[in-house]
Image (cartoon, grey):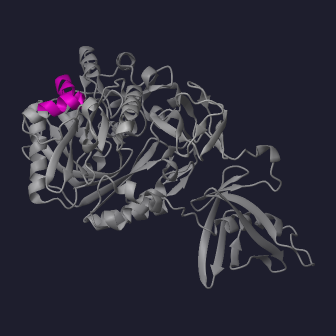
Amino acid sequence: MITSLLVANRGEIACRVFRTCRTSAIRTVAVHSDADEKALHTRTADVSVRLPGTAPADTYLRGDLIVKAALTAGADAVHPGYGFLSENADFARAVLDAGLTWIGPPPEAIEAMASKTRAKDLMAAAGVPLLAPLDPDTVTESDLPVLVKAAAGGGGRGMRIVRRLDALKEELRAASTEAESAFGDGTVFVEPYVEDGRHVEVQVLADTHGTVWTLGTRDCSLQRRHQKVVEEAPAPGLSADVEQRLRSAALTAARTIGYVGAGTVEFLVSGDRVHFLEMNTRLQVEHPVTEAVFGLDLVALQLDIADGGTLDGNPPQPSGHAVEVRLYAEDPAHDWAPQTGTLHRLAVPEGVRLDTGFTDGDEIGVHYDPMLAKLVAHAPTRAAAIRRLADALERSTLHGPTTNRDLLLNSLRHDEFTSARMDTGFYARHLPDLTRPTADPLAPLAAALSDAHGRSRFGGWRNVPSQPQVKRYVMAGEEIEARYRHTRRGLETDGARVVHADARLVVLDMDGLQRRFEITRYDDDLLYVNNTTLRLLPRFPDPTTHLAPGSLLAPMPGTVARVAEDLTVGSTVEAGQPLLWLEAMKMEHKITAPVTGTLTALNAVPGQQVTVDSLLAVVQAP
């Protein structure tokens, strides 16, 4: 019987497993890198063990250190979570060889699916339909577009869509580098890319006594950088025949490799065609939607199966519909650049499930995936679940770095999604519309009136005609001025009547319509009006902060991974040409020339650590 469990992972999934452990009276053990010393999963476990360093290769990918940590802490079982070592057969064997219980499938099953190329060969022999890999050396124009994909791991890392033959070599190299960094294995392969495909998967659960459940379908078609953003169960709009073929193929895959525990078989569905993609031999990030629809705790079932428990002959019947969104600290409007900083406040309304690895005041760093939380809504119908989730997102309080919240809201309310006509090209088609700024235009005025409240109480009005008071803010990347006046009657402004104004609340009346603005301040110049972020600008800007036109600033903290070949000061560059790459949050981020011109400064060198807004280079237009 499992009495003490170590989670060989971090963040949200570690917290998720710990939650089930607490209800099951199982002692919890966390491991943490130096960067995660004060992380939520570290704080909430019964005990935690340090893994010295910050890079995944030195910490969460060190199976030997994790096994040692489990033995030192007195754990008798190890749950791998997802990512990192969760699909590493050698790690599973090391856990078992140490006399510990492994919460996952047999190492042989992991090995069978660990390489996506070997998995495809195995599934083809079993009669599972799939897209055959292509030889990178023989790809021609007629094969395009193609998808470069890491043979190991998942989560969108090591994947590239290639539409130009002359870009294939560079994308193979970039995907391999990214996969090596994330998974310790830089092997990649190439397969046809289906433009109009939907990403549909089947949750499987198997015990050690021969029972295998297929727990319906999930649709995960809304993806950025091949990483899922919105997921739902069941997958909408599938014919009974397609759904049956998906479940049959998933059952065949699980039985072929002698699977045990929770796993997911992923497919590309185009029309009535079904293609096997891969099998994830672990718990998926999106497992909560299946839990909601089937009324199950998949982690509890994983633990029970590892303890030798049996599944009933048939799974429970599904009920209703569930939708999940992944809330990321990133800027979708600027190439999905990850964001860092303090998460001042994260609060969601009741009625939705929140899975997160952060609490108020936590720091979002540069070392790991930028996912902040998952929000899940369950309702009797798909439309009701979407509506409930969108409403919860809109009413959530989110103060901190830039996030994809507006993108998620706009996605949930987009006609293509609500009518279930989406596919994996959704964001490629609609990203500009989905990321248009939605900052409240009245937020600067409310902020200024809130700040003016203190002075109006202490004689701000004078018995002479007065000029408007002006405050300047940065909102959604633009400078905005807010004007108001101190009068005998109190604070006044053009276009709105001030009903109430104090340091925390402003109420404005516009033609009989009253709106409330809650103001929260975190330092002298950072404030939030409801959920709109404002930065107060100084009255007299510092002229030394001016940058030359064409300056390229680091959009995030990170490491300069590489600089374009033969790039030197004096080089002529084209607008959009890649100049250098930053590595942050386990992904490579391309920095391109803003204009066509001459490179007049290059401050970046490979291996250099940079902070946000560090000057990397300058391109001077002719």
Report the residue that reaches farthest toward the right.
Answer: 464
How far across and how far down the image is residue 565, in percent? 52, 28
Q: Residue 310: tell me if it is visible.
A: no
Residue 578 falls left or right of residue 384: right
Residue plotted at (30% across, 40% down): 147
Q: Which residues are magenta?
A: 104-122
Front residue of this view, candidates 464 and 589: 589
How far across and how far down the image is residue 593, in percent? 57, 43
Residue plotted at (80% across, 51% down): 541
Judged by its main secondary structure, the magenta piece is: helix
The mark total stands at 0
How far across and how far down the image is residue 507, in percent? 65, 73
Front residue of this view, candidates 207 and 595: 595
Residue 29 falls left or right of residue 140: right
Q: Residue 95 occupies which quadrant of the picture?
A: top left
Residue plotted at (50% across, 34% down): 584
Query: Would you say residue 150 sits in the magenta stretch?
Result: no
Q: Quadrant of the N terminus?
A: top left
Query: Would you say residue 112 sits in the magenta stretch?
Result: yes
How far across and how far down the image is residue 480, in percent? 69, 63
Residue 457 falls left or right of residue 322: right
Residue plotted at (75% across, 55% down): 537
Front residue of this view, candidates 150 and 283: 150
Q: Residue 107 occupies which quadrant of the picture?
A: top left
Report the residue that reaches farthest toward the bottom.
Answer: 512
Q: Residue 250: tell me if it is visible.
A: yes
